[in-house]
Amino acid sequence: MSTRKPIALQLYTVRRESANDFQGVLRRVADIGYVGVEGSLDFFADEQKDRLQCIRDLGLQLPSCGIKLPIDERSRQLLERAAEGGCQYVMLSIMPEQFQSIESIKAVAERLNEAAEITSRAGLTLCYHNHWWEFENQFGGRSAHEILREHTEPTVSFEVDVYWTQTGGADPVAEVKKLGARAPLLHIKDGPAVKGQPMTAAGEGSVDLAGVIEASQAHARWLIVELDECATDMLEAVEKSYTYLVTKGLAYGNKG
């Protein structure tokens, strides 16, 4: 294994736990040893300044934030604030009904190209985050994801969700290799890779996380743990995921 990458937590993972105690949950995340968190662009809005300050006070980085399309004037202002605040990436997903035909996929690509032009001007890199449908939907033996990346400009990067990639029937190791430098972010999650079944802590499922991370070493900048649902206590799974990735030498954190 070559140079390890920093580990962050997608805050969607702890959305229920943090709903009534954001500061307490974030303190737990920092105490575990996570280097950063992935949150929302709205964290840079005035009405959420307390949350942003909490992240900073705990010494957590905020390398990536979620964004929605279309990008309006308010979002443009927040993009500038995010870049000034040290954020490097913004990420988004598109719903499955937009991947039902080659023409609709090309339309998605055009929307991403336009959004990337705006985010680039603000100093941020746009990353498209996949689910299973981009790989499950096939057109002449080619996945919707492959068609999408063919029609997006180099300014559009990808946040590869390795679990959903496998759930959609693709090999996440191979997909990460194909994307190369266009995949600076990886969403790390584990489990049975079966739709409708809960996820597990990293290292307890069927995803070859070591293989994926090794394949990404030359290009990945952050490994971001995300569990949409989990069969066990979520915060325990968050800690187990951190421990697995760090002790196996797959990522680095602030502890261990």
Image (tube, rainbow, N blue to C red):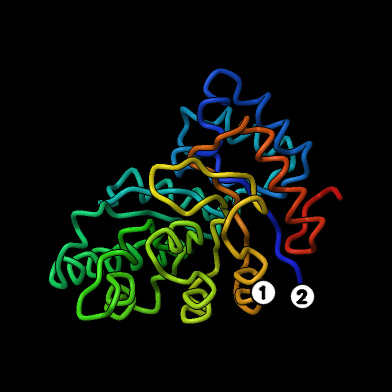
| Residue where numbered disc 1 is placed | 214
Percent coordinates x, y for residue 173 in the rendering:
54, 73
Along the viewing direction, whichever of 152 and 97 lies nearer the viewer: 97
- Kind of element beneath mark 2: loop
Crowding at label 1, few (<14), some or many (≥20) Cα neighbours within 10 Å? some
The answer to whether mark 2 and mark 1 are in CB contact below 8 A is yes
Residue 87, percent across and down?
A: 56, 54
Q: Nearer the viewer, residue 19 or 85?
A: 19
Q: Which residue is mark 2?
A: 1
Q: Residue at x 84, y 48 (%)?
A: 255
Query: Quadrant of the rendered structure where residue 94 is?
Result: bottom left
Q: Is residue 168 above or below residue 113?
A: above
Q: Answer above or below: position of 63 versus 40.
A: below
Q: Is residue 201 left or right of residue 19?
A: right
Report crowding for label 2: few under 14, some 14 to 19, many 20 or more residues within 10 A (C-alpha). few
Identify the residue shown where x is 33% and y is 76%.
Answer: 146
Amino acid identity at mark 2: Met
Mark 1 element type: helix
Which amino acid does the dot numbered 1 rest on?
A: Glu
